[in-house]
Amino acid sequence: MKSKRQTTDAPVLTPSQLESSRELKWVDSFTRTLDTKLRIPGTNVRFGVDFILGLVPGAGDLLSLGLSGILIATMAKNGASAKLVTKMLGNVLLDTIVGTVPVLGNLFDLFFKANYRNLELMREYYDEDKHRGSVWPMMLGITAVLLIIAVASIWLLVKLFSMIIASF
């Protein structure tokens, strides 16, 4: 799904899509800041703040994941379907997992551009006129499940450490 647009910093969304919502206009601009704002001199290879953040082990990847989450949540608020959000989360998950591998992750991030891909998915979705409705009920459900998993994991860790300490 490598787009020819990745060699420029032109808006991804169409003019009518950009005019339809200030939030979508922000998503387009911020996505390009994260993924295509800068160019390696003498090449058509573009990168952005996301690539630079990826150079900071751990914290950079975590911050990048959070920024991608904000972009996805904003697109969901503007009518992305549950299926589209799932595809977007898959792109970010792949970017995050591979991004944790030193050097290889940085090279992958230089060319994969999950946020840019997600914005292109949103543009195509709008072009097909499927952007009605809200994904918030699904997002709330996913958040609840993740919260339950997090609490259960913490509870299990506490129990495990208690058992280990009690055995001494």
Image (cartoon, rainbow, N blue to C red):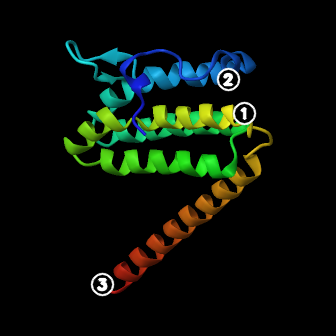
Residue at horizontal 56 percent and vertical 66 percent from the top: 149
Residue 23, labelled with which disc?
2
Quarter of image, res 25:
top right
The local secondary structure at tag 3 comes to loop
Element at label 1: loop
Work out which quarter of the rendered image holds the N terminus and state it: top left
Three-letter amino acid code at the position of disc 3: Phe
Would you say residue 70 is visible in this rendering? no
Q: Looking at the image, tell me whether mark 2 or mark 1 is earlier in sequence order.
A: 2
- Tell me what residue is drawn at x 68 percent, y 33 percent: 126
Q: Position of residue 76 (x, y in %)?
A: 68, 40
Given residues 69 and 168, the one toward you in this image is 69
SS at mark 2 in the image: helix
Q: Which mark is residue 168?
A: 3
Looking at the picture, does residue 24 appear above or below residue 159? above
The reply to whether callout 2 and callout 1 are in contact (CB within 8 Å) is: yes
10 Å crowding of disc 3: few (<14), some (14-19), many (20+) = few
Quarter of the image with the C terminus is: bottom left
